């Protein structure tokens, strides 16, 4: 890295010397949970921390962004019943994230991002970021490797339903893990699996949804089609994720509130 961007490697005087006027601290939030027969339990942590680290290495030296070590166990109870899945409750995760933000604030930083790798954390992140903003006045963000990632068309042979229903251990996650940790991908065990979802305006995710557990819809733990991921595709997806993350970091650093005057009569 052109400058030291991993905050835990610094001494406290070095951390004190950082110009915190517009500096951004980014916390990867991963998980340890089932990802089908072909991907490791650590998938979400590998993606969130791996993409972020590569983006940090490519930032311009003048960009004041710093990375923390990842949260590796989070709210994964939707995957209960699949051995190896580890999880903590919503209240516990909320408290952990809130207290880390408190510490970042007390260190003098005014901007922070939770860089999330697991969909089950999104609801907690909505709540805790609002409360951090209210309690500490920090500018606080939440996003992921996919925030500004422009996805290409799926290659021939991949079930087109992956584009809308591929939400877990799917084509994209498989491509990113193949690029980041290829030795952990069991390609011979990759199989499509889609829920036999009813015809309904109520979705798995989105503006109106029914809450679910993985076992309600998937026998393998997969939602999507993880097949036909070539080395070229894997590297392309990683590059798209890293490029998008660089843009995300730069936009967060540039982001400021334009607070209006309060009209009280």
Image (spheres, grey):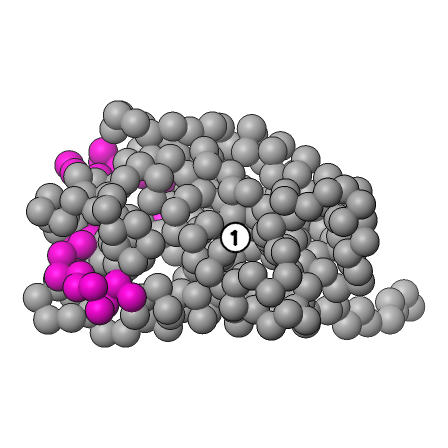
**Residue at image coords 62%, 56%:** 5
Q: Position of residue 180 (x, y in %)?
A: 33, 54
Residue receiving disc 1: 115
Dominant secondary structure, magenta: loop
Residue 1: name its quadrant: bottom right
Total labels drawn: 1
Asked whether 232 falls inside the magenta stretch, the response is yes
Q: Which residues are magenta?
A: 209-235
Q: Is residue 213 visible?
A: no
Q: Position of residue 212 (x, y in %)?
A: 31, 38
Quadrant occupied by the C terminus: bottom right
Q: 204 or 77, which lies in front?
A: 77
Which residue, as the protein is rendered here, is positioned at the far right?
265
Name the element at disc 1.
strand
Q: Is residue 77 visible?
A: yes
Residue 24 falls left or right of residue 34: right
**Residue at image coords 23%, 74%:** 153
Residue 5 falls left or right of residue 187: right
Q: Position of residue 166 (x, y in %)?
A: 25, 55
Residue 117 falls left or right of residue 104: left
**Residue at image coords 68%, 64%:** 64
Neighbour class for label 1 at 10 Å: few (<14), some, many (≥20)? Answer: many
Q: 70 or 137, which lies in front?
A: 70
**Residue at image coords 73%, 69%:** 256
């Amino acid at each position: 890295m052109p400058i030291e961007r991993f905050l835990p490697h610094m001494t406290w005087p070095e951390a004190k010397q950082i110009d915190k006027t517009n500096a951004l601290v980014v916390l990867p939030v991963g998980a340890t949970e089932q990802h089908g027969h072909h991907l490791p339990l650590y998938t979400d942590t590998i993606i969130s921390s791996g993409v972020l680290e590569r983006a940090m290495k490519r930032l311009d030296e003048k960009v004041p962004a710093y990375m923390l070590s990842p949260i590796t166990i989070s709210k994964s109870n939707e995957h209960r019943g699949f051995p190896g899945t580890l999880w903590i409750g919503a209240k516990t995760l909320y408290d952990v994230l809130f207290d880390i933000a408190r510490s970042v604030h007390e260190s003098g930083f005014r901007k922070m991002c939770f860089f999330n790798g697991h969909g089950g954390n999104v609801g907690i992140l909505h709540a805790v970021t609002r409360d951090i903003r209210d309690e500490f006045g920090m500018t606080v963000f939440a996003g992921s490797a996919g925030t500004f990632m422009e996805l290409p068309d799926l290659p021939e042979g991949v079930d087109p339903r992956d584009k809308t229903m591929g939400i877990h251990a799917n084509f994209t996650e498989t491509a990113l893990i193949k690029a980041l940790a290829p030795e952990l991908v069991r390609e011979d065990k990759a199989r499509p699996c889609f829920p036999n979802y009813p015809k309904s305006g109520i979705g798995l995710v989105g503006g109106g949804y029914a809450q679910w557990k993985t076992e309600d819809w998937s026998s393998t733990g997969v939602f999507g089609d993880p097949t036909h991921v070539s080395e070229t595709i894997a590297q392309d997806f990683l590059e798209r994720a890293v490029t998008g993350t660089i843009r995300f970091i730069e936009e967060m650093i540039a982001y400021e509130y334009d607070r209006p005057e309060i009209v009280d009569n």
